[in-house]
Each structure stands twice: as C-alpha cells, then as structure tokens.
Amino acid sequence: MNTDHPGMNTDRSGVNTWRSGGKSGGDGGKKPSTATRLVALARERYRFVMSTDARPYAVAIDGPNLALPLRGKTGVRQRLARLYADTFEGEVASQSALADAMTVLEGLAEDDDPVPVHLRVGSTPDGRIVVDLGAADGRAVVVAPNHWEVVDRSPVLFRRSGAMAPMPEPVRVPGGLDRFHALLNMDRPAFRHLVAWMAAAWMPDIPHPILTCKGEQGTGKSMTAQMAINLVDPSPAARRSQPRDEKAWSRQAFTSWALCLDNISTIPRWLSDTLCKAVTGDGVVDRALFTDDDVVVLAYRRVLAMTTIDAGALAGDLAERVLMVELQLIEGTRRRSEEELHTEFEAARPAVLGALLDLLAGVLAVLPSVRLDSMPRMADFARVLAAVDQVTGWQTLPDYLAASSNVASDALEGDLFGSAVATLVEQAGTWTGTAAQLLEQVQPPYGTRPLGWPKDATRASGRVKRLAPLLRSVGITVDDTQRSRDRARHKLIVLTRTDPDDVPASAVSEPGQAGLWPEEPPPEPEECPPDLY
C-alpha cells in the first residue's frame, strides 16, 4: 500500500495540472476522464477491502480503522463527489462518472482475500475483545485478561450503521454497579444476572440468552431493557417494535449488535424460530439490488433483549434460550420521571461501563480454567456465569439453571396442547401410540379446539417434537424412533414420566486458581434498593 502512495500522489498532481491547463492541458495532451480522476483521488486516500459477507468497503489510509461502504449516504461515493468539487474548482462529477468509479473501486476490493468486518464488538486473533466506542475518532476499548484500556485506533476493522450511537469513555471509579442498581427495580439476584449478561454481551464468539424483563405493568421493564442495551450497544432506537416478517427483522438485526423487542405479548412461530437462530447465528440470502442472479448475505449473531408480561408466550426452543429477570412493582411514592432517570443514567454510565469492563477482564482471566460438571443448553453462557461467580463470589449459575427450569414450566403451562399432553402422561405414567391416537386421546379444554391446536396427525407429531425440551424440563421424555410391530410399521410416540433433570452444573477450576474479587458474605434478605423509581 505504501509503495503505491508516491504514484498516486504523482497522478493527483498530474490531474491538478489538467485542471489548470484547461481542456487540453498545459502540454496539449488528452484530459483524463472524470471517472479516472475520481479513482485516483480515492486510491490515494483509501484502501479497499471485501468483507467475509462479500461487501466492499473503503478504509481511510490515514484515519480511523473504520470500514466505509462505497455507496449510501455515509459512503465513499458522496465523499468523493465533494472531494472532486473541492479539488477541481468549478467542476462537478456526474452520476455516471461516480457510478463508473464505484465499479472500479469494487473491483479493487476483490483483489485480496476477504477480511472480518465487525459491528460494535470484535476480537483479535490472540483472544482480546475490542469494543467500538462509536465516536468519529475511531477510538475503542481493548479488553484482555485482568486489563482493559482505551486505544486511539482499533486493532480490528469496524463498520458503523445509522442505528448506532457513541458510547461514553469508561472510567474506573468505585461503586459503578451500585449506582446502576439504584436505578433499577429488581432484587440483588436478578441484578447480578443482569450484570453478568451485560458483561458477556461483549463476548462476540458465544451465543447469548435473550434477556427477558418480566413483570406486570408499571414495573419499569421497558426502561430497564433500554438502559441495558444502551450500555452494551448504544442506539437512538434501543427499543424496537415487533417486526412484520423475517426480512424486516434481518434488516434491523444487521444494523445493531444488541437490540430489544419491546412489549411482546404473543410470538408467532416464525419469529420464535428467527429469534432462536439469531441467538446461535443466522443468515438471510437475498437478491442484490439491480441484479438478476447476484445475491447478498445478511449474516449475524446478535445480543437480544425483550420485555413481556407473561412467559407463556415463549415457545419451547425459545424458552431454553432466555435469561428471565423479574421486576417488582413500583410504589407511587417511589416512582421517578423518565427525564430524571435518564439524567442519572447518563451521569452514571461511564462508571457503570468501567465496572462492567473490570468484570469482563476478570472473566477472561479465569474462563480458560472453568469446567462444568454438566452442560446445559446455553453451555457457553453457563461457563461465563461460572467464571463470573468465581471472580465475584456470586451464585449466578445455580440461580440461572433454576430460573431456566421455571421458565420452561411457565412456557409449558402457556401451551394448551403441551399441558394436555403433560396431564395425560402424569395420569398414565407411560403412553405409547401414533400421533393420530395421541390427537384423539388428548382433548382440547371445554371441548373446543383453540387457536394453535394441531389439526391433524402430522401437525401433532411436529408439535410434540417442538415441545420435547419443555416436556423434558418437567420430567417427561419423548421418543419417536420406534415403530409398531404390525405390517403397517406406524411411527410411534413414546411418552415416559421420569424424574425432572437435576442439573446443578457446578463449576470447577484448575487447582490454585483463586477468585480475583474478595468474597462477599451471604446476602441478607432484602427488598429493593432504597432509592428506586
């Protein structure tokens, strides 16, 4: 790249000579085209890369390590148009010249192998975590075991989106987490789960459970979720409405690392499946604009939060991927205005960020030595909780596993067909039969088939498969691998009552690994912090 700079600068001087010499130039030669001069201006200021999802970007040679799209309002195209007008006074690049230049620059981006382009959070090859502060100067936070620091230039390449907002620079001051807890309406165990979730949200290479703020109206669910998201990945629209379809959701998810779905009452099947895939990693293939056969890929793994009143809205797979925190009702005498909360949150945010980064740095130090006796569904997050407990002396992992079991039970109760199947097995102990026989034996309540009740044997069989994780949480196993012994060889469903899984999943560490934070005494019974909104 450096070897090209002298040539590019010489080209630029030549281009300026053409400008001063009129149409024919000082030596009577032919004037370079507008597109040629645009490409020359771009090459002396940017290098061009292709992301791993086949999107071309420009990166300023002498500037922040930020990936700029070639097109769009914040892209290089508009910057080049302005630069051209400033460089060649009295001339304006035409749309066709800009389009030709963009085509050439896209070709330059394909010269080298694709590179990772991160959104808000990334990681280096040696395992350090990098958090983009989102400011114009491109500064970032680099987190290593037992240490974090703010650097002027990010060691990894970040892209930005219109859904991002700058993050204040974190500071190291005592009491950051206490100041944050004072703004929330939850008890100490729930708050510790929230803190652990936020620290883990900056770990880009693991699935994160969906933070679910549950509580009746007036408990501050939406404000709590908004503050949590704005700590992890600030946005002018931290809370989003329920998307209309999968494509609309993918566009939202592609522009934010962390986002919240607010006020969820019912979750359609497609959205439940989409959220599950967004936790573990998802991608959508769509036709590229202005093409017939080219495609673009929207690939992502996201950190999600949502607010709800009833956990019964959660389907089986989704219920296994949530971290439920319950909020308590706010008394009228202790309620505070949103403006007051916002002011106090903004004042506390740098200290809260510093405390969360301290915790993350401690987790990175002990995580390689953490082992679990048993592996729950969200195993990577469970290991992080075990590391958090080792660093702080908390008990977030046992509480999380117990709460997950309760969430699964609540979700099963919210599914009328699943509840009926569970009742059947409770009475029979073991039930064996075809899906058609199961549908015939399990009758809907009040004799009327409710919305969502399976209409035929095929749907009933698929529904039992989807319910298997929830049924397992209450001690009912599902086996659909057997066949009847007659000539028809019908596929059988075997439902067996067992003891519910005991999954303490305690954490163990390598010998000699001590906690980095002082042990806390067992928490005394408490209600909420004294100054709650």
Image: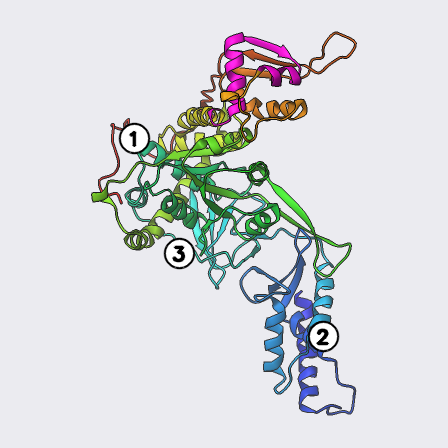
Q: CA distance from mark 2 to mark 1?
A: 67 Å
**Does residue 268 appear anywhere in the picture?**
yes
Q: Which mark is residue 520?
A: 1
Q: Is residue 297 left or right of residue 312?
A: right
Residue for point 57% across, 55% down: 157
Q: The disc labelled 2 sits on which kind of residue?
A: Ser
Q: Secondary structure at mark 1?
A: loop
Choose between 80 and 339: the one closer to the eye.
Answer: 339
- Residue 247's mark? none
Residue situated furthest left in the rendering? 333
Residue receiving disc 2: 96
Q: To which quarter of the image does residue 26 belong?
A: bottom right
Q: Which residue is mark 3?
A: 168
Residue 327, given in percent of the width and then of the height, sits at 34, 36
Is 106 one of the magenta-colored residues? no
User: In what element is the residue under mark 3?
Assistant: loop
Mark 2 or mark 1: name the one nearer the start of the chain: 2
**Where does the image place residue 324, in percent across and percent down from the top left?**
42, 33
Is residue 108 shown above or below 356?
below
Q: Position of residue 378 (x, y in %)?
A: 52, 30
Q: Are marks 2 and 1 in contact (CB under 8 Å)?
A: no
- The residue type indicated by label 3 comes to Pro
* Residue beneath the point at 53% across and 62% down: 64
Stretch of the chain drawn in magenta: 413-441
Vertical placement of residue 425 versus 98, above or below: above
Q: Identify the secondary structure beneath mark 2.
A: helix
